[in-house]
Image (cartoon, helix red, strand yellow):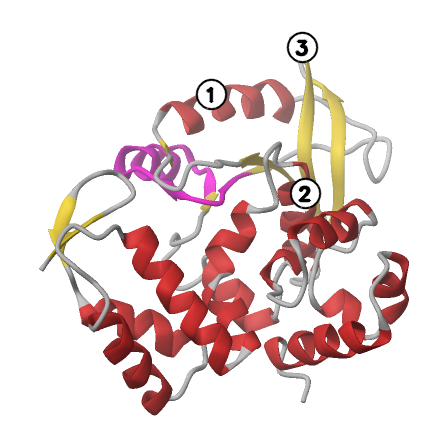
Amino acid sequence: MKIVKHSGNIVDYNPSKLKESLLKSGASNLEVETILHNIENQIYEGISTKQIYKMAFSLLKKTCHSHAARYNLKEAIRLLGPTGFFFEKYIARLFASENYQTLTNFILQGKCVSHEIDVLLKKDNAIAMVECKFHMGKDANSDVKVPMYILSRFNDLKDNRHTIYTRNDTVSKCWIVTNNRFTADAIAFAKCSKLNLLSWNYPENNNLKTKNDSHHLYPVTCLTTLSLAEKDKLLVMDVILVKEIINNSESLERIGLSSNRIKNVLKEASELCRYI
């Protein structure tokens, strides 16, 4: 059976790939087989991957909210847009979980011009700049022009002395982070230029997806027990991660949730972060 991807490309329906993604959500083999059976009874020639995803998400949600939330991770990161401001905060949280000191939205003077830096990192006395490339489009990739441009910014900054953590700091490393993917040329250029890349699927064993699962860094936009408006309110309050609400029910009270809904949200959050 042929299905239509987000890009418009037509491919064969691959139940094995769907099964793998469903199992990664935490659902049991029996639950996954039931979901696959239900989907295969509903799909048709030319159905879009978006519609299949919606079916799977809906069926997972009926099984377990936290499984659906985990399955929804990539879309949840996209919901940190549209400007990318909250994505930058999320990336800072991600590095902080790995014992980096972090600063966001910092302006540094380069040799030629000043630069607004999305995130600054410090670890083992080395300071790195992080450029976040956020994409709302699901099929948008960061091509080779992205690392080429950011390398020029890094080169303008690295030889200058800056007042960041002390009055005599230098920026010696550079990261480029995207919520989608890098093209092969972008990866090759970054490797050659000694730029660090982080995306949804790169590096293979230490990417956004694996870091989330390892450190329970799920954004609040994952939660299925909150509306989009409620998630936005939490983000504005600087509540970025699901784990930040587990011992902070006051933030849920502040956005107007009833005691019963707070209980449901905290249950999903705890299950998602495996606190219970």
For the question of whether residue 181 can be seen, the reply is: yes
**Disc 1 marks which amino acid?**
Tyr
Task: Tell me the residue that label 1 is attached to.
Answer: 149
- Quadrant containing the N terminus in the rendered view: bottom left
Question: Which class describes the residues within 10 Å of circle 3: few (<14), some (14-19), or many (20+)?
Answer: few
Q: Which residue is mark 3?
A: 113
Image coordinates for residue 24, horizontal then vertical, percent: 40, 75
Instruction: Report the magenta residues as a range.
Output: 175-196
247 or 68, which is in the foreground?
68
Q: Secondary structure at mark 2?
A: helix
Q: CA distance from mark 2 to mark 3?
A: 26 Å
Instruction: Compute the Cα span from label 3 to label 1.
Output: 14 Å
Question: What residue is at 34 percent from the left and 34 percent from the top?
Answer: 186
Amino acid, disc 3: Val
In this rendering, the answer to whether 164 lies above or below 18 is above
Query: Residue 58 lies in magenta, yes or no?
Result: no
Q: Amino acid at mark 2?
A: Phe
